[in-house]
Amino acid sequence: DTAVSQTPKYLVTQMGNDKSIKCEQNLGHDTMYWYKQDSKKFLKIMFSYNNKELIINETVPNRFSPKSPDKAHLNLHINSLELGDSAVYFCASSPGGLLYGYTFGSGTRLTVV
Amino acid sequence: RKEVEQDPGPFNVPEGATVAFNCTYSNSASQSFFWYRQDCRKEPKLLMSVYSSGNEDGRFTAQLNRASQYISLLIRDSKLSDSATYLCVVTPSGTYKYIFGTGTRLKVLA
């Protein structure tokens, strides 16, 4: 059983399209995250939800919109995709608080052409 | 100054060597510290937490120096399978964000 699963694993799409990435965790964790890893391998937080409530919203273009229908799911919708959105997007979860590390999903490699 | 800084490497070491990485952080009130490992084209995986008194897990030792604002990771008796990128993670005070360093690449050579 995969603890944090993301779909799709790969996504190739044209500029201007709208796409969604889904994430589900079966660990019973309260907190979920979206991170972006760019071509220089830098991992930057985008959003975090705690029990369906948005708690972290970094400086991200408003073309990116997270949605958490329940605490086990956190989806990411991206409108009007741009070339610069090409990256690996990682979903992660944690029990909450600061003492615990994250469990990451295997990532979604997004390529915008 | 970046919030979390690491030497990108690569560190090329022979099997059996001992290697150490440092990671500096800018927020003196940072609360939680971790080391993660990331293999090529894979997700980061938690290697170990870093406790104030230092901690060890097998061949890996992590230390925290609050006065100089850095954490370190020591790997003894390096194995080929230790080749990866090692990411340090810091949680600034007053936030629930984990800030990742850019990683230090390790290559263990046969």
Image (tube, coloured by chain):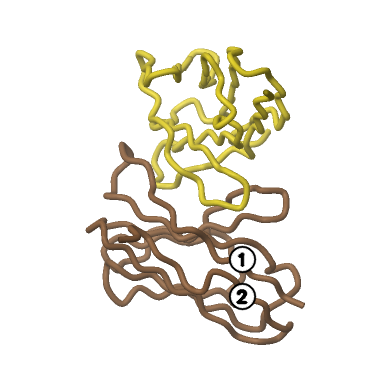
Chain colours: A brown, B yellow
Q: Is residue A14 left or right of residue B47?
A: right
Percent from the top left, x then y, of residue B48?
Answer: 40, 30
- The answer to whether B3 is drawn above or below residue A20 in the figure is above
Q: Are marks 2 and 1 in contact (CB under 8 Å)?
A: yes
A3 or B90, nearer to the observer: A3
Query: Tag 1, which chain?
Result: A
Distance of label 2 from label 1 (alpha carbons): 6 Å
Chain identity of mark 2: A
* Residue highlighted by disc 1: A109
Badge 1 element: strand
Q: Quadrant of the C terminus of chain B?
A: top right
What percent of the width, then of the height, locates residue B26? 57, 29
Left or right placement of residue A17 versus residue B48 in this view: right
Judge from the rendering whether residue A57 lies leftward or rightward of residue A55; answer left or right.
right
Residue A11 marker: 2
- Residue A17 location in percent, x, y? 66, 87
